[in-house]
Amino acid sequence: MLKMNKFFKFCFAVILILIIIYLCSLVSFIFNPLLSFISVIIVPLMLSGFFYYLLRPLVALMERKKMNRTLAILLLYVVFGGILVGFLIGVWPSLKAQIIALVDNAPAIFAALNKKMLELEQSGFLEGVFPEGFNPLTTLTEYLNRGFTFLTEYVVNLVGIISEFAIIMFIFPILLYYMLKEGGKFGELIVRFLPNRFKEVGTSVLGEIDSALKGFIVGRVIVNFALGILMYVGFIIIGLPYALLLTVVAVIANFIPFIGAIVSSIPIIIIGLIQSPSTAIWSLVIILAAQQIQDNLIGPYIFGKQLDIHPITIIVLVLVGQDLAGIIGVLLVVPVYMILKILISRIYELFFKERWEQL
């Protein structure tokens, strides 16, 4: 009888939650201003959180050296401003030249790619690789056309992109400054709202979340930087065209766990195939070798067990994140999953573990 009462209480609570969600959907216009605000602030907030975890150890180190915290933050801004200027002077011209060359040569690249694929198809090589009835040339052309349509839409909306970029560049440094200056007080504010008996646990949970996010973000930057160096050196050795541009794209895409590495490999192999089949094969070898070094040597040393997530779980998370919120969802889904995993495990330990184990 007691178990039935608990069951009915649980069902009643679920029904109430569903009713509340339904009622909120009927008055969605009330939440539209909030959603608009979130859409404006989400990217600057993501960037601020990203750089907060990168720069916080430096701010703490400078503060331990008896430097004023505000002065330390401003000094870091000056240093990174200098790094940005150095990038614009030293790296951007080469990167820009490769981007312009790739755009100018796009028709010739497509023509060369079609020619290579036709040669492979006529040689019978593709028949042994792909199943009967599957035409890789048609499929590849279809996906490439989708990609160019996507890029064309972004170029058409260039004014909107520039305006959004200006807003991000205005809000981001301000948010980052206050996060670096007052970031430690945010956790204290959350704990203050908890009942006294949960304050110690709340502090521990927030510390665990903070440690997980720090390990994930800092580790991802280090791992991607190492991957970029390995790939760029390899591409230079084999003489791959647009080596710098393709490496930058691969490093950025690799911030999307697991899937990003696969997606970024496609243009590299295509450019290699246009030059020669052997270049495409060597490009693939370099990608696989760099990924293996990253996953088996650098990654475990940097991440330890902080990113103990199965690859299938990551794939499902990325697909769900993309479906819910596009590229923002893809970038946020793994950190959000890590936070929820910590919260749910601690809630289970606090309220359910002992009771359920006695059943």
Image (spheres, rainbow, N blue to C red):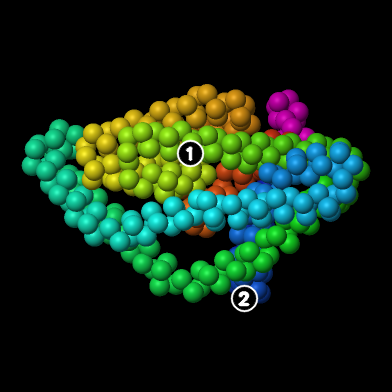
Residue 267 visible in rendering: yes
Where is residue 60 drawn, in percent x and y?
81, 41
Residue 332 vertical placement versus 23 (above, below)? above
Position of the C terminus, as image quadrant, is top right
Residue 162, x across and y down, in percent: 53, 70
Image quarter of residue 66: top right
Taking the image as shown, residue 266 lies to the left or right of residue 27, namely left
> How much space separates mark 2 and mark 1, taking CA atoms?
46 Å
Q: Residue at x 63, y 41 (%)?
A: 217
Provide residue 184's location: percent of width, then percent of height.
82, 47
User: Image check: 127 left or right of 210?
Assistant: left
Nearer to the camera, 134 or 216: 216
Answer whether residue 338 is visible to the viewer in this image: no
Q: Residue at x 43, y 57 (%)?
A: 96
Which mark is in front, 2 or 1? Answer: 1
Would you name the residue on which mark 2 appears?
Answer: 29
The percent coordinates of residue 146 (x first, y second) are 31, 59
Residue situated in front as seen by the camera: 234 or 167:
234
Residue denoted by label 1: 228
Q: Dot 2 lies on which element?
A: helix
In reply to whether residue 349 is colored magenta, the answer given is yes
- Does the magenta segment cover residue 255? no
Cβ atoms under marks 2 and 1 closer than 8 Å: no
Q: Residue furthest right?
A: 196
Q: Amino acid at mark 2?
A: Phe
The one of 263 and 277 positioned closer to us in this rendering = 277
